[in-house]
Image: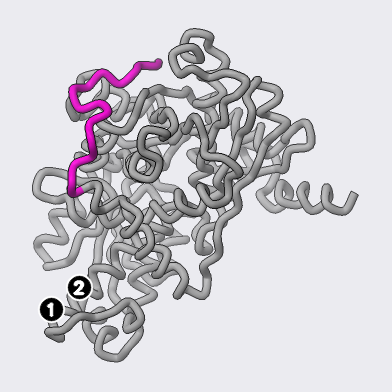
Amino acid sequence: MFLLNTTADYRLALDPRDEKALDASAAVEVERHLASRRDHGVTPLVALPGLANEIGVAAIHVKDEGHRLGLGSFKALGGAYAVIRLVLEQAEQRLGRVVDMAELHSPDVRAVAQAMTVACATDGNHGRSVAQGAQLVGARAAIFVHSGVSDERVAAIARLGAEMIRVQGTYDDSVREAARVAKANGWIIVSDTSWPGYERIPGLVMQGYTALVREALRQMPEPPTHVFIQSGVGGIAAAVAGHLAIALGESRPLFTVVDPARAACLFETARARRPVTIAHGEPTVMAMLECYEPSLVAWRVLSRAADAFMTVDEADATDVMKRLAHPVSGDPAVVAGESGGVGLAGAMKAVADPAVKAALSIDQRSRIFVVNTEGATDPGKYQEIVGLSPAAVVGKNHEGALT
């Protein structure tokens, strides 16, 4: 399914709150935090000239977030950053003075963090980021996971010292339960989705994601003409679309939001021109995107900055995983998890449909940008789908370098 943005807000300036959260100065602060971390490294931008030639466009660039901060997902940028910002703010209140990022590991700030508990619901990746942020500063973390989250993903979060709490039902059920328990216990919810009265912290999470956009713009030889970004509640799509709209203005690329067909809450919201909650159906293999209610902050951005919305099917997601693992025409292999390659799957589906291709003005001059939002965060599931282990796929690139 495909539709163009027909909301009344389309192409209006971003809400001042969102512009402040996603502009260059906010992104610089995120990069300042990252520069202080020993595990930080700029993630690679992978060119796929062979695939670009095959589908008839000028370039395809993939920002590979499977390498981010040891967590294997773009989510590493958001939750941890929000936790650190909240600790610094709490320290300022307790100490009665401005507290700089450089003081994060000082005894005074550490004492404040140790008295804090942060909590969130997760499909896997956001919870790992929040838990890592808490571990970095010495705070406690309580992570709520729904029944569909794999044991391997739960174990990966637990290894960061978080308390794990299982919730029956879907991701949205775990969001509600996390909010209820956190309120009862005086914990701070660090959610990547927002609801009425709860917007600022999800805005900080989205702010963390702007770092990958700034990196990519510096890495690309030319800005993209088209961007396809996958969506769960909408946070990553909104962060990329919003920052590109601010950074590039009238020269910004055409932006398409890509949803799983089985969990298309942003697509249906765009169709209704207002936030809607969709019915729970059959689970999707795109587990990190299985969300049934959009983030209100994300929708506020996307209603203005997204040009189109589309869905991809289960086979589209698994086919692109295999395509990236078994590249043709000399392209490098890329390890993409079940949700990681969905933006690229959307781009390929759009190019293959003459009507969609025309609607998006895609031609042989188009430069497409996508984000591999996760690597093999569940290695067993990855090997089951692709037929190779993540290490074997990475090994293809080393073999190519030796021949």
Q: Is residue 39 above or below residue 109?
A: above
Amino acid beneath label 1:
Gln
Along the viewing direction, whichever of 42 and 138 lies nearer the viewer: 42
Q: Which residue is mark 2?
A: 89
Q: Is residue 322 magenta?
A: no
Q: Residue at x 29, y 84 (%)?
A: 110
Q: Is residue 72 above or below residue 33?
A: above
Q: Which SS type dominates the magenta stretch?
A: loop
Q: Secondary structure at mark 2?
A: helix
Position of 317 with respect to 105 (left or right) is: right
Q: Is residue 7 magenta?
A: yes
Task: Choose top left, top right, bottom left or bottom right for residue 388.
Answer: top right
Give the image location of residue 46, x and y in percent. 63, 45
Q: Residue at x 42, y 31 (%)?
A: 284
Amino acid beneath label 2:
Glu
Magenta segment:
1-17
Q: Count the marks.
A: 2
Q: Quadrant of the N terminus?
A: top left
Q: Is residue 283 visible?
A: yes
Give the image location of residue 141, x and y in percent. 29, 68
Contact between marks 1 and 2 (CB within 8 A): the answer is yes
Q: Residue at x 73, y 49 (%)?
A: 392
Position of 348 with respect to 260 (left or right) is: right
Give the image location of residue 238, x and y in percent. 33, 40
Q: Which residue is mark 1?
A: 93
View extreme (front): residue: 250
Along the viewing direction, whichever of 278 and 13 lies nearer the viewer: 13
Q: Is residue 174 visible?
A: no
